[in-house]
Image (cartoon, coloured by chain):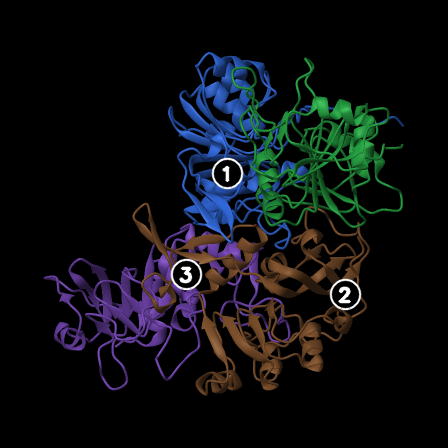
Chain colours: A brown, B blue, C purple, D green
Amino acid sequence: MNKVVANAHAAISDVQDGMTLMLGGFGLCGIPENLIAALVQKNVKNLTCISNNAGVDDFGIGLMLQQRQVKKMISSYVGENAEFERQLLSGELEVELIPQGTLATRCMAAGYGMPAVFTPAGVGTEVAEGKETRVFNGKTYLMEMAFEADFALVKAWKGDTQGNLIFRATARNFNPLMAMAGKTTIAEVEELVPAGELDPDAIHTPGIYVHRIFQGKDYEKRIEQRTVKPR
Amino acid sequence: MNKVVANAHAAISDVQDGMTLMLGGFGLCGIPENLIAALVQKNVKNLTCISNNAGVDDFGIGLMLQQRQVKKMISSYVGENAEFERQLLSGELEVELIPQGTLATRCMAAGYGMPAVFTPAGVGTEVAEGKETRVFNGKTYLMEMAFEADFALVKAWKGDTQGNLIFRATARNFNPLMAMAGKTTIAEVEELVPAGELDPDAIHTPGIYVHRIFQGKDYEKRIEQRTVKPR
Amino acid sequence: MLNKEQIAQRIARELRNGMYVNLGIGIPTLVANYVPEEMTIVLQSENGLLGMGPFPFDGEEDPDLINAGKQTITTIPGSVFFDSAMSFGMIRAGKVDLTVLGAMEVADNGDIANWKIPGKMVKGMGGAMDLVASAKNIIVAMQHCSRDGKSKLLSSCTLPITGLGCVKKVVSDLGVFDIDHRGFVLLERAPGISVETIVASTEGRLFVPDEVPEMTF
Amino acid sequence: MLNKEQIAQRIARELRNGMYVNLGIGIPTLVANYVPEEMTIVLQSENGLLGMGPFPFDGEEDPDLINAGKQTITTIPGSVFFDSAMSFGMIRAGKVDLTVLGAMEVADNGDIANWKIPGKMVKGMGGAMDLVASAKNIIVAMQHCSRDGKSKLLSSCTLPITGLGCVKKVVSDLGVFDIDHRGFVLLERAPGISVETIVASTEGRLFVPDEVPEMTF
């Protein structure tokens, strides 16, 4: 059950033009830096990317936007990216904005084999257009469909050779949810260990959801909003 | 945010006749032994109990059945309990049997604020009677409603004063799911520690779901099927 | 007229011991600075944290530890991390006691608009739609009027809606308002602000009780 | 005629390297004893474990570590624990490659009954309904006939159904059968069992190919 591949390039060798990708991370926190770099180098095109954010101009998914690799973004918040806004306003980029919790839950639904979920988020708004609504206990909910992707690309703190993953702090965010929703899931990790070294009670993503894993390198972990207090 | 109560008796002081309780555990593994003992001593009656199993004749929920405290059991498997079978066949006890995964998911749904979920389990069977079905991608699913309970009684390995819980091995089972589904959730733990001592990355149930917590005592942890191999 | 710090300070008076609270970006974030010392409040950050602490000391920033505004933060003892599905799960299930967020417009029926200005701004709703659709108790921190003097407390929102009938209370630079069947109910005036000024600045239905105390700080 | 161990041994030949497998209670559990040594299989136990190992040595039983049959077990390196919702989530999402379980009756359209005998037995379905409704590949291990000689491979189930049209393969004490549009398709005979015996013992539609090899062990 060894799922280790050599590096990011080997891991994405079969990602092709026109595919749908999920990319973990919230802002620049917990994004699969190595996999994004490999996608940029491979220069696959016409991608549909499902990710909570779209990176910043010169990092994260922003690097893929610069190269016009992305046909459509499905995100909840894209406010940190001027190039993104330019492509959107000029019509070069198709964008579907959905509530953050809906995005998270639709990924989880796929991983749990649930074809649809109900959420009140977006009832009465643009988000509800064309969607089925349903009232339970007097409250209105939208029916939202599970999200699947050809590839889910996630970043974990530690992982083992069988694909078990542990995330760190708020870098967890969407990563375990997308890991469950990929037809093929690729995980890059800061530290790859032999099977048996991770505490079985502390694993966030069971290896059954992960198809390929590799040790990432040169993590930049850029901070978007450096906020500090005086000493 | 200190949620510590003195003991099981204090924790269940406001459990009343006719209420709906969830009880964590799979078989006798991970059951809230102290809370069950307190319920037996308090001798509250006409309870509806949601629990995957019904204990054995002389342990777990079986002790409550002996005292005729249970009006209705909602479970997935009850095959280890002669007194249970007797009460059921004689009509003294009302029983609703539902698939194990459905039980788990209906608890999680409550904890996640989802009023209903879709599962294929039970389609075409007795379980489907009276339930709405729906086809997604050519496959038929049942719509199953979220489960709530007046009290959820769970057992964890470690917990802190703010109600954060960590479970151990397969004693996790339904405990974190029911913890999310109780209007009031009470956790008994083998080891109660001050807030800050548990690894925030390794907590299974965030304290926001837990209302009362106490250090349990005298754990018997009875084994149902002792299976060993020769040395 | 209240400044941003005073709006936050006034909202902090709505806090009760033991509350789980989600604070949005902007003025709401400042509310954390005014939690009374004897009170225990646990802050939820919807990217996946309960028990958010203050900003870190310079040099101690952890890129893996940010809040929903993408700011570097710290944690307090008893904190816990989780994924975004559980985070919005606990929000949807009503486990968060109070949500404070900003708004561009609020209507007298509790509708709120705060995510989009057609043709001008396309940043997305983030977690706002989830929060307003599910929170038990929502307080909005906002400026009463736009820079060109137009009321943002309206009879109906002109911008795309974030959520319907969800806002319970508004704290603006001019006053504090409940929202119920009567519309905006004026509870308190900002220091030096007259009822007349508030009436003139409010486009939506406004109910003015016989006595409207002036806030003190 | 195959004994229980041989049924398990024959089913083990369906295993492929890298499979995630869920083994039911009874004969299916025995399949674990016949995994070829060079093969890596990860066993899922639906109460919340991936990476189930053999029974513990006497005295090393851990009451917190049991399988879905409530037996004390061990884990192998790389094992992971999770709650029951995630456990059935991965089952429902089709992540488990193979499910082996017992049955009281199987019909020639793939229906299965294994959870209830009206008026006699009320133990409940446990996880069986979830497993049969979701598994990609289900193999049933069963006795071909009841003790009084009645076929359990039927044209339609007489007992309450566990799942519709889900069984892909049956290994009984008499033979191995695929299930497809032709009904039960006889693939292999148990040692010493004739095609005629199997025909006589099968109430449901049975398709017999020109050649039906005899199993060897």
Disc 1 designates what residue? B123
Judging from the image, what secondary structure is the residue with disc 3 in? helix
Going 38% across and 26% down the picture, which residue do you hit? B16
Disc 3 designates what residue? C130
Chain under numbered label 1: B
Three-letter code, disc 1: Val
Three-letter code, disc 3: Asp
Going 50% across and 70% down the picture, which residue do you hit? A75
Residue sitting nearer the eye, C32 or D201: D201
Judging from the image, what secondary structure is the residue with disc 2 in? strand
Which dot marks residue A214?
2
How far separated are the C-alphas under marks 2 and 1?
41 Å
How far separated are the C-alphas under marks 3 and 2?
35 Å
Chain under numbered label 2: A
Packing grade of label 3 (10 A; few <14, some 14-19, many >=20) is many
Q: Where is residue A149 in the image (x, y as percent from the top left)?
A: 59, 64
Quadrant showing the C terminus of chain A: bottom right
Q: Where is residue A69 in the image (x, y as percent from the top left)?
A: 60, 81
Q: Do the residues indicated by labels 3 and 2 lie within the same chain of the protein?
A: no
